[in-house]
Image: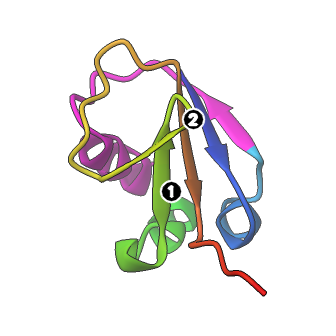
Amino acid sequence: MDVLYFAWVRERIGAPRDTLTTQAATVMDLVEELRAREDRYAAAFEDLSALRVAVDQELTDFDAPLAGAQEVAFFPPMTGG
């Protein structure tokens, strides 16, 4: 599975993406796995209210299932102007 990071999430993690194998059933399970990897991941996922997530390019919630997913993306909320 490809895990993509955008904006300040990418800056905190220090990479634009990870490719990993996971047994996570939901996005939240994946977040917990990522938090446990290193402090930089824990910092990036400290405040989930400041993040949005998309699974296979569809906006979703952190309780969304990951069965069959190829890509998960994390990014801050979009703002207009």
Q: Nearer the viewer, residue 58 or 62?
A: 58
- Quick one: SS at disc 2? loop
Q: Which residue is located at x 42 percent, y 20 percent?
A: 69
Q: Give the image location of residue 31, x and y in percent.
A: 36, 50
Q: Give the image location of residue 1, x and y in percent.
A: 53, 21
Residue with the mark numbered 1: 38
Q: Which image quadrant for residue 77?
A: bottom right
Q: Nearer the viewer, residue 13 or 53?
A: 53
Q: Nearer the viewer, residue 20 or 75?
A: 75
Q: What's the residue type where badge 2 is placed?
A: Gln
Q: Where are the magenta residues, as a range? A: 17-38
Left or right position of 24 against 3: left
Residue with the mark numbered 2: 57
Disc nearest the viewer among 1 and 2: 2
Q: Nearer the viewer, residue 63 or 10?
A: 63
Q: Which residue is located at x 30 percent, y 51 percent?
A: 32
Name the N-terminal-most of marks 1 and 2: 1
Label 1 environment density (alpha carbons within 10 Å; few <14, some 14–19, many ≥20): few
Q: Is residue 20 magenta?
A: yes
